[in-house]
Image (cartoon, rainbow, N blue to C red):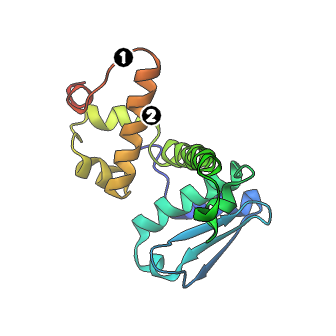
Amino acid sequence: MQGKIDIDRLFFWTDLFGIKVVFRNLRPGLLGSADAWRKIITLDESLRDRPRLMKCVLAEEIGHILYPPRPGHIRYHSTGFWETEYLERSHLKVIVAQDERKALTWATGVLIPDVEFWRAIGEKHNTIYKLADYFEVEDWFVWIKIGYIRRKASNQGQRLKWRDIIRR
């Protein structure tokens, strides 16, 4: 595959963008975090032994640095979030979802470029697991990419299902 991005390329980009990457033991369930203003990405120590997962998490966190969260995003992650008024909570949820989508769109676009995705499908890498192996990413990352492809088709007035994708 021509355009495969490996973990070393991602670390090269962090250096190029002036982003510092540190490893720490994060709280359970949290694999990474990004401080866009200080340009620091913190990854959980457990990722050192899981290169595919590290690649996906690092790419998403770089996306958060390149597309910083809007005001209110941090408050969503605070312990007092549920004490805010319902309408404000709903508004913050939308902001956070949009910010996450920007970061993941960048990450999936880098690790699974559209042209390479369709080439892989054409070469009969037509299951989630084959695509994950082909791009050396986690299964959930491929599902996200497929969701973005389907959303793009929907925005163009098309309805695209998985069977339509693998038929191509």
| Position in image of residue 164 (x %, y %) | 23, 25
Identify the residue at horizontal 38%, vertical 30% (top origin): 150
Q: For numbered disc 2, what is the local secondary structure?
A: helix
Name the quadrant of the C terminus: top left
Residues at marks 1 and 2, CA–CA distance in whole angstroms: 17 Å
Identify the residue at horizontal 20%, vertical 26% (top origin): 167
Estimate how packed mark 2 is, as few (under 14), some (14 to 19) or many (20 or more) residues with alpha carbons within 10 Å.
some
Name the quadrant of the N terminus: top left
Whichever of labels 1 and 2 marks the residue nearer the N terminus, that label is 2
| Position in image of residue 138 (x %, y %) | 35, 58
Judging depth in this view, the residue of 129 and 26 nearest the camera is 26
Q: Residue furthest bottom?
A: 25
Residue linked to disc 1: 158
Judging depth in this view, the residue of 126 and 61 nearest the camera is 61
27 to the left or right of 72:
left
**Amino acid type, callout 1:** Gln
Q: Which mark is residue 9?
A: none
Identify the residue at horizontal 68%, vertical 61% (top origin): 74
Residue linked to disc 2: 114
**Amino acid type, callout 2:** Asp
